[in-house]
Image (cartoon, rainbow, N blue to C red):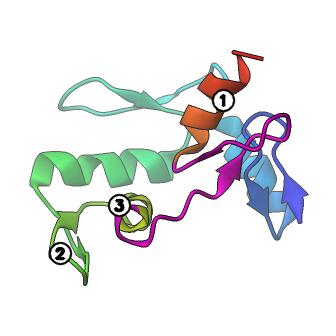
Amino acid sequence: PHRCGECGRAFGLRSALARHQRAHGEERPFACGECGQAFALRSNLALHRRTHAGERPYRCGECGKAFGMSSTLVRHQRIHTGEKPYGCAECGRAFVRSAHLEQHRRTH
């Protein structure tokens, strides 16, 4: 797999990693006409627009809660499974979100 040096996320294709890495950059040319929030990727803007439309097509089979993005559903489902896929290489502590791991790493 091809791993992002910034956040540790892994991708099967090098092109997918390259697309993902744009999200870490400063340039955000795709702005929402409704609220002004800007995105590095056009696809992320399209997903964001669902929040304004109230679309929530992804539903949790465990509790019924609905989400606008499949990735948010996957993250939510970790509440039910107890999965913590982001582990600290230094101390072994694990986290549900990669952002929480990054925040934790700063404590070492």
| Local SS, label 1 | helix
Q: Residue at x 19, y 48 (%)?
A: 51
Instruction: Specify which label sits upstream in the sequence, 1 or 2.
Output: 2
Of the 4 image quadrants, the one containing the N terminus is bottom right
Tag 1 and tag 2, C-beta contact below 8 Å:
no
Tell me the quarter of the picture where residue 6 sits: top right
Instruction: Specify which label sits upstream in the sequence, 2 or 3.
Output: 2
On the image, the x and y values in percent for residue 32 come to 30, 33
- Check the image and name the residue furthest to the left: 54
Give yes or no for residue 83 being in the magenta stretch. yes
Distance from disc 1 to disc 3, alpha carbons, whole Å, reads 19 Å
Tag 1 and tag 3, C-beta contact below 8 Å:
no
Per the image, the residue denoted by label 2 is 63
Distance from disc 1 to disc 2, alpha carbons, whole Å, reads 29 Å
Q: Is residue 33 above or below residue 75?
A: above
Of the 4 image quadrants, the one containing the C terminus is top right
Per the image, the residue denoted by label 1 is 102
Tell me the quarter of the picture where residue 24 sits: top right
Per the image, the residue denoted by label 3 is 76
On the image, the x and y values in percent for residue 28 come to 53, 26
Q: Horizontally, is 88 left or right of 75 in the view?
A: right
* Magenta span: 79-96
